[in-house]
Amino acid sequence: MKLPGNPKVRIGICVFAFFALVALVGPYVVQNLMGLSPSDVHTADAMQGPSGAHPLGTTATGEDVLAQLVVGSRVSLLVGLVAGLVTTALSVLVGVAGGYLGGRADSVLTVLTNICLVIPGMPLLIIIASYVQGRGGWLTVALIIGLTAWPWGARQKRAQTLSLRHRDFVTAAEMTGESRWGVITRELIPSLAPIISVSFLGAVVGSMFADAGLSFIGLGNINITSWGSMLYWAQNGSALTRGAWWWFVPPGACIAVIGVAAGLINFGIDEISNPRLRKPPKKVRDRAEAAKLRRRTEERAEPATAPKAQEATS
Amino acid sequence: MPASAEPVLEAHGEPVLEARDVVKRFPLHGPGQHGKEVHAVEPTSLALHAGRITALVGESGSGKSTLARMLALAYPPTEGEIRLDGAPVKQARTARGKRAYYRQVQMVFQDPFSSLSPVHRLRYILSRPLQLHGHASGRAELERQILDLLNRVNLTPADQFIDKFPHELSGGQRQRVAIARALAARPKVLLGDEPVSMLDVSIRLDILNLLGTLRDDEGLAILYITHDIAGARYFADEIKVLYAGQLVESGPADAVVEQPRHPYTRLLLESAPDPDREGALLDAPEVVDDEETLGEPPSLVDPPAGCRFHPRCPLAKPVCATAFPPRTQFDDGQWVHCWSYDEENYR
Ligand SMILES: Nc1ncnc2c1ncn2[C@@H]1O[C@H](COP(=O)(O)OP(=O)(O)OP(=O)(O)O)[C@@H](O)[C@H]1O
Ligand SMILES: [Mg+2]
C-alpha cells in the first residue's frame, strides 16, 4: 500500500501506524527486552520522576509508567477499533438501508434510531458498564460502546442516502437489473465512502475517549492496564496534587495525539476519496505519456506542418 | 375525412411495450401546497412496436421524461398500466422480476452528468449490465465486449476510455457511455430521453445511424424523445406530440411534419428551423416570441380545463375550455385531438 500524497493524511496515518506498531510489538519490547513490568509493585521506587531505569517514572505503587503506557495502548487501540467498527457497520447498515428502502423498513429503522438517540449515550454507557462491572474484559467494553454510539451516524447516513436515492445514477443502476442489496453495496456505499471513512475515524477516536472516560471513573475493568485505567489510578493516587506529571500526562497526551491525527486525516480524506481530485492510476498516466511522446516524435518528423502544436506540447 | 378504423397502427402487429391510459400526478409538499398535485401526464396511451422508432416531441415540461420513466418503471403510474409483450407489468417488486424487465427495456437518461456514478470507471459501469444479464463470462470476454460497446458509440480509442472515470469525459462522451450501457443489456425496447441532444452534429448522426441500424437489423423498438420535430422526421417512423401531459397528435413522421393538423404541432414546426422550409425559418421568431397572443405553457398544478392548449390556441372555441376533444382519425394513420376537427362543432 502506498501512502497518499496529501501531507495531512500522511502525518495522520503515520501517527496511527506508530501507535499500531507500539500496540503490536511494544509490550514485547518493554517487557522482554527492556525488562520493565506494568504491574510489578516496587514500593521502594514509588512516585519517582523519569530516570534511566524508569524512562517515564513510576506510579505511587512503583509500577513503571512507560510499561503501562505501552501495554495499555494495545487495549485502548483495540477497544477503539472494535467499537469503531461496530458503530460504523451498524450506522451504515441502518442508515443506508433505511434511507434507500424507504417505506415500512425505513419507518421501523427510523423509530429504532430515534429511540436509541434520545437515550443519552454516556449515562446509558455508565449504567450498562456498572452492571457489567468489567466482566468480559475489553471486548465487552468495546461492544457496549459500539452498540450505544451508532444512532447519530445512522441518521447522518440516512440523510445522505436520501439525497442520493433519486439521483439518476442510482435509478440507472436499478435499471441495469441490480438488486437492492447490489445498489446499496455497489453504488450507495461507495458513493458515501468519504463520509463513512471519516465517521469511522471519528468513531474510533470517540470510542477510545469513551473507554478512557469509563475507566477513568472506575467503570471499566480497572485491573486491565489501559490509558483510561492509568488515568483512574493517577487520579486515585492524587498524582496531580503531588505534582507527579509523568504519571498522568503520558496517557492523556497519547489520547490527545490520536485525536489530532484523526482530525488531520479527516481534513485530507476528502481529497483521496473524491475521484475528481484523484490522480489517474499509473497505467493510464503512462499511456498518456507514451501517446504524448509519440505525438512529439511524429511532429518532429514533419515540423513544417505542425510548428504550433509542437510549441504547445513542449 | 375522419375514419373509424386504426389502419396504420394495426399494420405493425402487437406492440412490444405499451402504456395504457397512464396518468401521473406528483403530490406537492411544502407550506401551503398540501393536497396540491402536479398533473404531469393525463390519460395517455402509447405503444412501441418492434423495428419502429416512435418520436415523442413536446416543449420543456410537457411530461416526456415522466412518460418515459413510467415506461421504465422508475415512476409508478398514478393510474393505468404498462404492458410488456401484451401482459400487464405488475410493478416488478422482486429483484428477479425487475432484472427480467430491464433485460428487455432499457432507458437512456436525459442528463448524462447525473446518470453515471462518479465513483466507478467506465469498465465497471459497462460490465454490470453484461454480467447481470449473463451476456459475458470470463474476464477476457467481458473486456472484449466492453471495448466493442465503446467502439459502437464512437468512444475511440476504446482501450483508453475503458479506464476513465465519468468526470474525465465531456457531456457528449458521457451520454455515449449511457447509450452504451443501455445497449449492453441487448434490450428489445430502448427509451431514449433526448439521447443525442448533448452531442455535436457529426456524432449525433453516427449515434442515430447506430440506433437506426439496430432497429433494422435487430428489430429494436425505440422511443425517441426530442425537442426537434423537424429532425425527428428523418429518424423516426412515427411522431407523437405531447402538450402539457396530453397527447394531441400522432401519425407517420412524414405526414405529421408535412401536414400538421393540430395547431400546437404547427406552432412547433414553425418555430423549428427546418432546412426544407425556408419560409418557416423566417417566420419562426415572430411566432415564438409573440407571447401576447400565444402565452406561456400552462401551470400543471392548476391546469386549464378541457384542451390544455386552448389559452394559446389561435382556433380556440368555447368548447375547448370545457372538454378535451375526442380523437379524430385520418386515413393515413394520423390522428389528432382537436375540436376544430370534430364534425358536430366544426363549421
Ligand atoms: N419527481 C417530480 N416531482 C414533482 N414534479 C415533477 C417530478 N418530475 C417531473 N415533474 C413535473 O412534471 C412536469 C413534466 O416534467 P418532465 O420532466 O416529464 O418534462 P419534460 O417534457 O421531460 O421536459 P424537458 O424537455 O425539459 O426534459 C414538469 O412540470 C415537472 O415539474
Ligand atoms: Mg425531460
Image (cartoon, coloured by chain):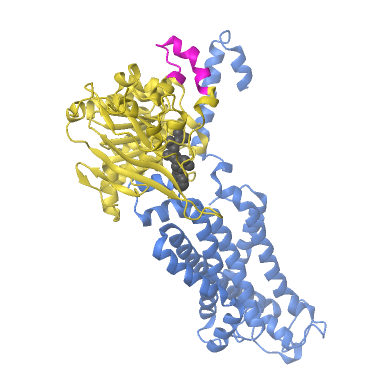
Chain colours: A blue, B yellow
Q: Is residue A182 above or below residue B122?
A: below
Residue B91 x, y percent position in the rendering? 29, 52
Which quarter of the picture shows residue B5? top left
Question: Residue A274: horizontal and vertical position, in percent?
Answer: 56, 47
Q: Quadrant of the C terminus of chain B?
A: top left
Q: Position of residue B204 (x, y in %)?
A: 41, 23
Where does the magenta region start and end? Answer: B270-288
Residue at position x 17%, y 27% from top? B11
- Asked if residue A104 lies left or right of residue B103, the reply is right
For the question of whether residue B115 can be seen, the reply is no
Q: Is residue B277 magenta?
A: yes
Q: Residue at x 52, y 71 (%)?
A: A114
Residue at image coords 46%, 65%: A94
Residue B43 falls left or right of residue A259: left
Q: Nearer the viewer, residue B221 or B170?
A: B221
In the rendered image, is residue B172 in sight?
A: yes
Question: Looking at the image, which residue is at 73% across and 85% down?
Answer: A235
Most extreme residue toward the top, as rendered? A304
In the image, taking residue B17 as reference, residue A179 lies left or right, namely: right
Q: Main secondary structure of the magenta part?
A: helix
